Image (cartoon, grey):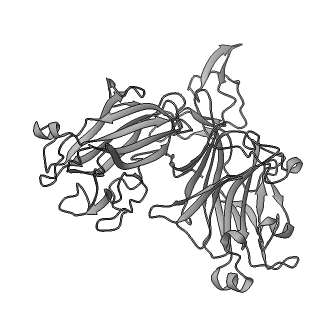
Amino acid sequence: MSVPPLHGGDLLTNPGFELDPPGPTNAILGWNAYSASSGNVRSETSAAIAHNGTNYFKVYQAFNGALNYSGIYQDNLSGPGAVYAADAWAYTSASDALAGQNVAWIEVTFRDASANILAVYRSALITTNAIATGAFPKSTWIDLSVTNQYDPNTYTITNQTAALVAPAGTSFVRYQITFQGDAADSAGSVYFDDLTLAQTAGGPQGDWNIVWSDEFNGTSINSNTWTFDLGNNGGWGNSEMEYYTSSSQNAYVSNGFLHIVALQQSMNGYNYTSARMKTEGLYSAEYGRFEWRASLPSGLAFWPALWMLGTNITRVGWPDCGEIDVMENRGSVLTQVQGSLHPGTNQVYTLPGGSVTNFHTYLLEWTANAVSWYVDGVRYETQTDLSNPASQYPFPYNNPFFIIMNIAVGGNYVGDPSTNTINAGTTFPGQMLVDYVRLYNLTGPLQLSARKAYGKVFLEWPVDIACHLESTTNFFGASPAWTNVGSATSPFGVSPTSTGVFYRLVSP
């Protein structure tokens, strides 16, 4: 399937706070709040005040007699070389203007996989002096652009630029609103609305490129990549109630999607069938970004999952082999997904105003020091304790893993429902649609080069990036028709023509 890039336009979720409930509320959907006092970070409703719409964000200090910080932040997937622009509209009311040494600003930081700060950019500071001199007038919405670059060690300004560049080592970009409250408990608040973080240059993930993928654009499941777990295997350790098959009724490729289907169908003493596909023995990887785009089923009994196991499972067993759950969902809770390590911990993510029955991208970034989970580019969990001291194999996440996709029916994760409960509360069939599975790694740039030799032109491109060559003879036309150049591999020799042929690389 042809799908839009992960990045594009405003990357922020709920940038104008219109997804939030009406009235004063601390439920700021899509954002993480940090506060030294409960209640001083919230969204409010007033069409007369909001810059656009009806909602806006309000922040003030903690009144705890010490220097304190409050605000909200949101993390988005990024990579080295990506370039951004950021701004927000800010307002301080004449009836509640900043006082004392209180300060507010917008901040963009680039961080590595362990959340260490690599680069810092800020807007102009909102201070009582800026208000007094008219640089930030009261009761007026002001567009604050992030243009000041700071030294991340000394926090002194080193440069002024509207191009916010992700440095080497970047895993994600954090957009943050900060209110610094003084120790004198000075009053005053600042409102923010219509926040923007836009990528202006670089690839969707910086220097990360697709090195392996299955786009499911053919007519059948690729048996060189995928195999199946079969049967029930005692409930697979989870009290599951389905019988897994390799039948085309339970797993097939059609219209650019992989379909995994759970059926109410009797087989070998079980009342339900489904499919559990895996790349074990066929494909595995250690580290990188693993991305799925998928739509999940709705139903009390369904337990869809996208996950990975260590390739050494047959030798060391579970859980010593390690388990990474990129995404799992309870089919009765359509607004939440979960990411986990076993052994380890887990985190639940609530989709802001969405449902898992719609297509979403689920991405896991795995490095030697950290594992992070993203939904639609938004980071919601990072784990840095990747060891298991109790095991004779203490570092399960420093080994290759293979990929698994399945829909379980019943089981402990969904509350161990009985057959009668499942039949009463679940509509069959239940279907998970997978658009693609992709692995990204940091590589050189995806670019095409040419050299002449032996009367031909040889086209060359990186062999470690999943891509294919396309050509057209109508490049300057209104709508060039690009054609896939068969099974062309680098280097690829072509004979010069008088009419001209144009070539490009497409990934994946």
Viewer-nearest residue: 491 or 390 = 390
Residue 377 rendering spot, x and y as whole percentages: 51, 48
Residue 253 rendering spot, x and y as whole percentages: 71, 59
Residue 66 rendering spot, x and y as whole percentages: 31, 44
Q: Quadrant of residue 210?
A: top right
Q: Residue at x 14, y 51 (%)?
A: 139
Seen from this angle, which residue lies furthest front? 65
Image quadrant in which the C terminus is located: top right
**Is 256 drawn above or below residue 230 in the view shown?**
above
Q: Does residue 394 appear anywhere in the picture?
A: yes
**Is 23 drawn above or below residue 208 in the view shown?**
below
Side (left or right) of 209 relative to 131: right
Residue 208 rendering spot, x and y as whole percentages: 58, 35
**Is 426 drawn above or below residue 157 in the view shown?**
below
Q: Does residue 178 appear anywhere in the picture?
A: no
Viewer-nearest residue: 415 or 140 = 415
Viewer-nearest residue: 132 or 295 = 132
Side (left or right) of 107 relative to 488: left
Q: How many marks?
A: 0
Q: Residue at x 66, y 86 (%)?
A: 424
Side (left or right) of 193 relative to 188: right
Q: Residue at x 81, y 54 (%)?
A: 318
**Is 405 drawn above or below residue 81 in the view shown?**
below
Viewer-nearest residue: 93 or 144 = 93
Q: Quadrant of residue 181?
A: top left
Side (left or right) of 260 relative to 39: right
